[in-house]
Amino acid sequence: MANSQTGDSVIDRLVRVLATFDSEHTEQSPSDIARRAGLPLSTGHRLVGDLVESGLLERDEDGQARVGMRLWELATRGSLALGLRQAALPAMERVQALVRQHTQLGVADGDQVLFLERLSHPQAGANITRIAGRLPLHASSSGLVLLAAAPPAVLERILAAPLERLAPETITDPAALRRKLAEVRRLGHAIAPGSIEAVSTGIAVPLRDRGVVVAALGVVLPRGEEDDRVATILRAAAGEIEAALAAPSRSSTILVTFKS
């Protein structure tokens, strides 16, 4: 129910406050939160106070606000994403032991890949991906795998919009992206050299739950260290994860959240 001069609901404003927290803004003053959320200072301070009182945010000794443990607890309870991560982690650890670089698990959320887990080696190459981080679907190997399985309406909407360039080799031409997605479907995996960072190559395969692509399992390697065996390793791991997802003890299907 809207109850502000701008027509924003309380929920809208609370979500905007919480959305100001990211990897670059883990602790913020109430004034900074209000500014980044596009709210009047008085409203921002009041909402931060309410969220602190509920435990969704916490204050440190300097009065800075940060995400509270209560928010993590509530978000984790019964989470289908958590179930997917738990099913995938043993196989991801085996992949990581073999490739000794970066191994990551991503799902589609809107027009982006949301990364649920990442395992890395201390001497691994460059990778900007973080747990709970996001990348455009067209720009990463994980995103290409997910986009290749997306409903036609989703693909057409993404192709109709400008495709963001993150690195010199990010695919930004719609026709080239169509060809790339056809290649992904034909090969059963995506390889994206220099698409996110010029020095890295991403390789990813789809994960299915009851026949539906619900996630992507990928690795990020230093440029020039691509190996055909990596896709084979990933496919074997994907088979293990899919078997875990199909186990009788699991009754919930992972949700795929493309925007229509």
Image (spheres, rainbow, N blue to C red):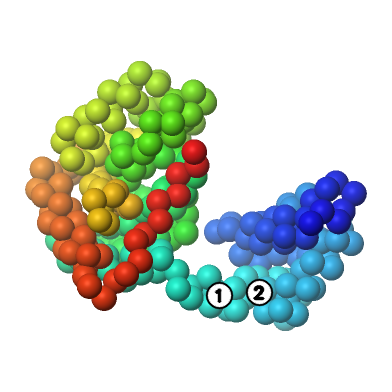
In the displayed structure, 84 sits above or below 219; it is below
Q: Secondary structure at mark 1?
A: helix
Which residue is identified by label 2?
56
What's the distance in space between the residues labelled 1 and 2, CA to CA?
A: 9 Å
- Regarding residue 151, the answer to whether it shows in the image is yes
Point 30% across, 62% down: residue: 120
Q: Amino acid at mark 2?
A: Leu
Give x and y (percent) for residue 123.
Answer: 27, 60
How many badges with numbers are in the image?
2
Asked if the residue under mark 2 is in contact with the one under mark 1, i.e. CB atoms within 8 Å, the reply is yes
Give x and y (percent) for residue 65.
Answer: 70, 71
Point 43% across, 31% down: residue: 153
Judged left or right of residue 22, residue 86 is: left
Residue extending farthest top: 175
Of residues 251 and 13, the one drawn nearer to the viewer in this rendering:
251
Which residue is identified by label 1?
74
Point 49% across, 23% down: residue: 160
Q: Secondary structure at mark 2?
A: loop
Point 41% across, 40% down: residue: 137
Label 1 CA crowd tier, 10 Å (few <14, some 14–19, many 20+) = few
Judged left or right of residue 120, residue 79 is: right
Whichever of labels 1 and 2 marks the residue nearer the N terminus, that label is 2
